[in-house]
Each structure stands twice: as structure tokens, then as C-alpha cells.
Image: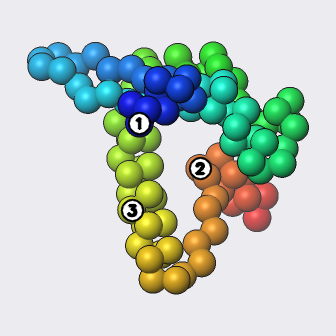
Amino acid sequence: MLQLYRLGLVERFRPHVPTGSAPWHYTLDEPGARLVAARQEIDFRDFPFKKARIFDVVGSPRLRHRVECNGFFARLAFTCRRRGWDLQWTGERRAAAEWTRA
């Protein structure tokens, strides 16, 4: 992650904690988002990245929830791939939209 940060592909921050210090947290930055969009063959204008949203995450009361959920799903994806299982990812917003339409 440090290498990606040094390349300017991700941004990092340390959330405020009452005592001690928190570990670095990383989020995609614009050059990284452009790379992901290109890899997925999506025009960057159509790619759902907004730099301002990075700063929304930093102060979010849901940060811990997001970190724990992302950690869980990263471990789940890793296990599925290791076992040769197909895993289709549906993010929180997309899942909510799908369920409210049903």
C-alpha cells in the first residue's frame, strides 16, 4: 500500500482516535480510479469516483463499519478464489437498490 501511495494511486489518512494512534487507512485517489476505469474499459467520466467523497469517509461515523465489512468481504473473496468458487460482488448501494425494487 505504501508503494501505491507513493505512486499517487491511493490516498491515506489516520482517523482520529481518543487515545494512541490509528493505523493508516487507504482509499483510491483519482489516478488510481483512472487506472481502474481504464482496466475495466470504462470512460472515466462514467466511472463512479468523486474525489470529494474521500474526505467524507475520513470523518464518517461509519468508517469502522466500512473497514470491518470490507475486511470480511476481502477474506471471503480470497477464500472463494482459492477454492475455485465464483463470487459475484454486489455492493451495499446496489444491493439496497435491487432489494427495494423487488
In the image, 11: left or right of 17?
Answer: right
**Of labels 1 and 2, the one closer to you:** 1
Q: What's the CA distance linking mark 3 and mark 1?
A: 17 Å
Q: Secondary structure at mark 1?
A: loop
* Residue for badge 1: 1
Asked if residue 51 can be seen in this view, the reply is yes
Asked if residue 62 can be seen in this view, the reply is no
Q: Residue at x 74, y 48 (%)?
A: 39
* Residue for badge 2: 92
Sequence-first disc among 3 and 1: 1
Give residue 82's position: percent from left, percent from top.
Answer: 44, 77
Q: Nearer the viewer, residue 35 or 65?
A: 35
Residue type at the position of mark 2: Glu
Residue type at the position of mark 1: Met
Q: Residue at x 70, y 37 (%)?
A: 35
The quadrant holding residue 32 is: top right
Q: Residue at x 52, y 83 (%)?
A: 84
Q: What's the CA distance linking mark 1 and mark 2?
A: 24 Å
Q: Nearer the viewer, residue 89 or 79?
A: 79
Q: What's the CA distance linking mark 2 and mark 3?
A: 17 Å
